[in-house]
Amino acid sequence: MSNYYEILGIVKESSLAEIETAIDRQYNQWRQLVSHHDPKVVNEANQALQILEEIRSTLLEKDNRKKYDKTLASSEKIGGLGDPEVMLKEMMAGGKRSSSQTLMKNEERIDAWVCDDCGQANPLGTQFCQECGKKIAMLCPSCRTLSPLAKEFCPECGVNKKEFFDEQKNRSIIKINEEIAHLSSEIKEFESGNYPEEIKKNVKGKKILLIVSIIITIIGFFELNTGESFSLICLASSTIILWAVFINHSHGLRNKITQGLEYMKNELLRLESEKKLIISSEYLEE
């Protein structure tokens, strides 16, 4: 089987620039196959790209290349790119494994999302396993990108998904506690008669109407002795109208106060219910 230099089509004495050019040339060729319609070709292309990255980190780093050349000199051959699976197995049989090799050992695939329960390889972007129905992916709580549950960090924005979720959860609880405390204080003020400024103006208007109604009523009693029927009728009509306005205003004000208090209490119940839902929410349930 071929060694790294033969895979790239270069000689062992090639310069770093020549090695990098050869890697880039093959990388671009395999990269075009990642979007191939055949899943087997896609899988082979992705594995080949990982092998090329391994070659890059080995031959373009001075100490790593020196170690590889020494190993090569002692006839420990590494498999060829023509059979990526064989090459990967031989690479992984070595003592020390790179991070990319460790990922392959754990059977992590970049061409599919694999269900932890049944092992089914699902197409990228699948939220529930097509074989057993288990949830295998969820939206990132930060950028709302769909990614596998097994990935601790979001591949799009890079946040630790669970830590970000817990942080947002704590912030939401703090915010809703502040809203509950503020609303509870308003309800107490309302119940004690310390109304908002708008209602205070209405209460003041109600008192003025009451005073004017009483004054006009008193004047009406004195006018009874004058015997002037026209003046008496006008005064009586004004008194009746004024009292009607006062009663209507009082009734409307009571309704406004009652409705306002009821609304705040309902809103408080809603906030308490929302708080319970936030506290009971878990990352994997989102």
Image (cartoon, rainbow, N blue to C red):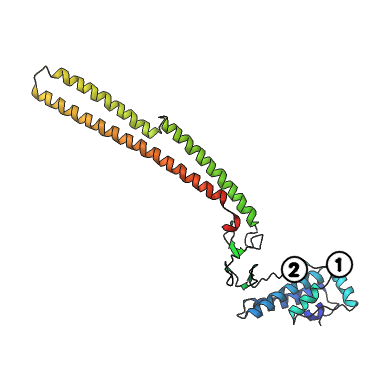
Task: Left or right? Give the position of 220 relative to 174.
Answer: left
Q: Which residue is mark 1?
A: 63
Q: Quadrant of residue 34?
A: bottom right
Q: Position of residue 247 (x, y in %)?
A: 25, 31
Q: Position of residue 203 (x, y in %)?
A: 34, 30
**In the structure shown, which secondary structural element does the residue marked by tag 1 occupy?**
helix
Q: Position of residue 144 (x, y in %)?
A: 57, 60
Q: Quadrant of residue 46?
A: bottom right
Q: Quadrant of residue 261?
A: top left
Task: Left or right? Give the position of 121 relative to 23.
Answer: left
Q: CA distance from mark 2 to mark 1?
A: 19 Å
Identify which amino acid the numbered label 1 is placed on.
Asp
Residue 215's disc number: none
Task: Left or right? Give the position of 233 relative to 199.
Answer: left
Q: Is residue 105 above or below residue 81?
A: above
User: From this viewpoint, is residue 18 visible?
Assistant: no
Q: Which residue is mark 2?
A: 100
Rendered residue at 60%/64% (across/down): 137
Q: Is residue 192 above or below residue 156?
A: above
Q: Position of residue 189 (x, y in %)?
A: 44, 32
